[in-house]
Image (cartoon, rainbow, N blue to C red):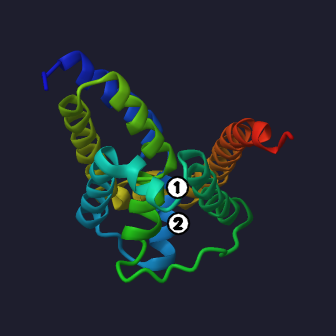
Amino acid sequence: MEFSLIEVFSAFIVLFAVIDILGSIPIILDLKKKSGDINAIQATTVSFVILIVFLFVGEAMLGLFGVDISSFAIAGSFVLLFLALEMILGVELFKHDSPGGASIVPIAFPLIAGAGSFTTLLSLRAEYQTLNIIIALFANMVFVYFVLRSTNLIERVIGKGGIYILKKFFGIILLAIAIKLFMSNFALLITEFLPKLKV
């Protein structure tokens, strides 16, 4: 495995865009309000471990259960859909009963370590050295940690009115992402299974 600063930077940018922790701030603030304080180190550590494990054994692990990446991504899109509807409609669809509060579910999974992150890691592994991907992923998790730690400050700076507007706006964005994730992977499944249905 060879270290490459260019590969690290490229992988970092791609993962940063997919994880989109800045865009998730309104979701995090909403979850914090419903389920109490969020443990930043726990959420970050769990996310990092999940993503590292998936980087090495994800595709094989899903294969053991007879689940492909597209089906997994579609399942993740439904979770994102429910989170988006909560934000837009102001209703509670997701029961926040995780032992770790919202830190593990849904923040660590599937908000940070979700279907988009999983499929991106598999794509990056085909192009870049594994060492460079791990470094880029770790750098992203450091950034995620500081954002999660700063939610109180962000909340004070933005204010309740700003949070309300951001929540509705990013709720629509999240809904669009969920629909896109569903449609693109549903199209892949249809393309894959249609030939099998032909006699």
Specify the quadrant of the image occupied by residue 15. top left
Which sits in the foreground, 22 or 80? Answer: 80
Instruction: Determine whether 55 is above or below 29 in the image.
Output: above
Res. 16 visible in picture: no
Q: Name which residue type carries label 1.
A: Pro
Which sits in the foreground, 143 or 122? Answer: 122
Instruction: Determine whether 22 is above or below 132 in the image.
Output: below
Q: Name which residue type carries label 2.
A: Asp
Specify the quadrant of the image occupied by residue 47. bottom left
Residue shown at 26% from the left, 66% from the top: 42
Q: Quadrant of the C terminus?
A: top right
Residue shown at 24% from the left, 16% from the top: 6
Residue 115 horizontal/vertical position (percent): 50, 49
Q: Which residue is mark 2?
A: 30
Specify the quadrant of the image occupied by residue 2. top left
How far, Cα to Cα, is label 1 from label 2? 6 Å
Mark 1 is surrounded, within 10 Å at the Cα level, by few (under 14), some (14 to 19) or many (20 or more) other residues, namely many
Residue 149 horizontal/vertical position (percent): 28, 58
Q: Quadrant of the N terminus?
A: top left
Q: Which residue is mark 1?
A: 26
Residue 70 horizontal/vertical position (percent): 59, 45
Which sits in the foreground, 142 or 168? Answer: 142
Residue shown at 29% from the left, 53% from the top: 53
Q: Residue at the right extreme?
A: 199
- Helix or strand or loop: what does disc 1 sit on? helix
Left or right: residue 8 compared with residue 51? left
Cβ atoms at labels 1 and 2 below 8 Å apart: yes
- Helix or strand or loop: what does disc 2 sit on? helix
Res. 142 visible in picture: yes
Mark 2 is surrounded, within 10 Å at the Cα level, by few (under 14), some (14 to 19) or many (20 or more) other residues, namely some
